Image (cartoon, rainbow, N blue to C red):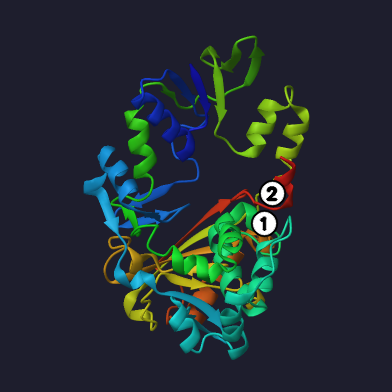
Amino acid sequence: MIGIIGAGISGLTLAYELQKEGEAYQLWEATPQPGGYIRSVREGTYLRELGPNSLLGDDALLAWLDELGLTPDLVFANAVSKARFIYRNGAYRELPGSPPALLLGGFFSLKTKWAVLRELSNKTTSPPGETLGQFFRRRFSSEIVDYALGPFVAGIYAGDPEQLLVSETFPLLLQYEHEYGSVLRGLIKNKNKTGRRQSFSFRDGMQMLPNALAAKLNQAHFSCPVQRIERTPTGWTVHTPTGEYPVDRLVLAVGTDAAARLLANHVPAFANALRRIDYPPMMAVHTVYKRADVAHPLNGFGGLNPAVEGRFAAGHIWSSSIFPNRCPTDEVLFTTFVGGQQNAGNARLPEATTQARVHQELTESFGINAQKPVRQHLFPWPEAIPQYDHNLQAV
């Protein structure tokens, strides 16, 4: 018997695969719903994603989703979403999407373009504990860190490139450096090996995925918090409000705070190391305007804000441009993320202040002629995304 604590996407997927293989398991989740950080809210014609906004998958993932019965509910991103924008010099400018566009376009300076070309002959190697910022400065330039890497990792990890470890976030870059002597050479040689990947979501949002997994499970217990775990000669005993469950093996698919609480009496040093993992706060803000009031065409995925530009938000996803049916057709929906490691204080401001600051930034950035939004919602994540920084090395 395998015990699984936590019904986020990891715990659910493990339980589902075990069940397919005929392996005995029990899954416990403290909250009434599956999904963890994956949460979608449907309100009539409006659909808000409180956590992850989409998946990027290949044919293997699509086949797995078909197995779950989700193929009829797939919604693929509009073609315009391939364009990504970065705020620079007072406006959102499209980030080059390919090496030729980088070298021939005007987004980066001649110095950085030359640094990109010289990367092919850069013989330096990564020392232990190198951060993403250090890696990209060593192989490319500070401008790449400030206006490409920084906003990119803020969007994915809510992190700071000066703290995130390259070995824990993008180990493939180290592999390319080691095998090919160049990141660019590695990307070129492997560009056709990853297969075609597409960005997509579901008719009623990302929540449909954990819901589909949970519906398949026959040994999942919701609203059933694990109170403690006890070591036994043959495995573990899991104590819950509904009873005690003996298991041979135990998987903790929970956040580090919850894991530390359960493990404190068994491996105290490990539990203390888990407590040092940092989760910066973030605020998800959903804002709707009439399309007629927005001058910007919004033909893209969204706009990210480099920390060096001193903007209030980390960035804005143009949700209604990426996926249809997120709001009425005569309106537009922005999903704004505030906070993260590089600007954590902004996620702790009063809600009214955050709403006003987001509205101000949106109106100034996208030519919006409206005194107030049609509607605006906030959702706080006091502990958003774990940081793969030097604290992780102690775990």
Q: Is residue 121 visible?
A: yes
Q: Is residue 356 visible?
A: no
Tell which residue pokes out farthest to the left in this image.
72
Q: Is residue 395 left or right of residue 235?
A: right
How far apart are the two marked residues, 2 and 1, measured between alpha carbons? 13 Å
- Give the residue at x 28% y 72%: 330
Crowding at label 1, few (<14), some or many (≥20) Cα neighbours within 10 Å? many
Q: Is residue 324 left or right of residue 18?
A: left
Q: Amino acid at mark 1?
A: Leu
- Give the residue at x 31% y 41%: 64
Q: Is residue 40 left or right of residue 150?
A: left
Q: Amino acid at mark 2?
A: Asp
Q: For marks 2 and 1, give the one nearer the viewer.
A: 1
Using the image, determine if residue 383 lies above or below residue 155: above
Quarter occupied by residue 75: bottom left
Q: Position of residue 383 (x, y in %)?
A: 62, 48
Looking at the rendering, in which quadrant would you find the C terminus?
A: top right
Which is nearer the eye, 342 or 84? 84
Q: Position of residue 19 (x, y in %)?
A: 37, 24
Using the image, determine if residue 190 lies above or below residue 297: above
Q: Position of residue 285 (x, y in %)?
A: 50, 61
Tell which residue pokes out farthest to the top in this image.
233
Using the image, determine if residue 131 lies above or below residue 219: below
The secondary structure type at the circle numbered 2 is loop
Earlier along the polypeptide chain: callout 2 or callout 1? 1
Quarter occupied by residue 33: top left
Crowding at label 2, few (<14), some or many (≥20) Cα neighbours within 10 Å? some
Using the image, determine if residue 64 lies above or below residue 199: above
Q: Position of residue 384 (x, y in %)?
A: 59, 50
Which is nearer the eye, 214 or 175? 175
Give the residue number, with chain letter if any, for mark 1: 165
Residue 278's mark?
Answer: 2
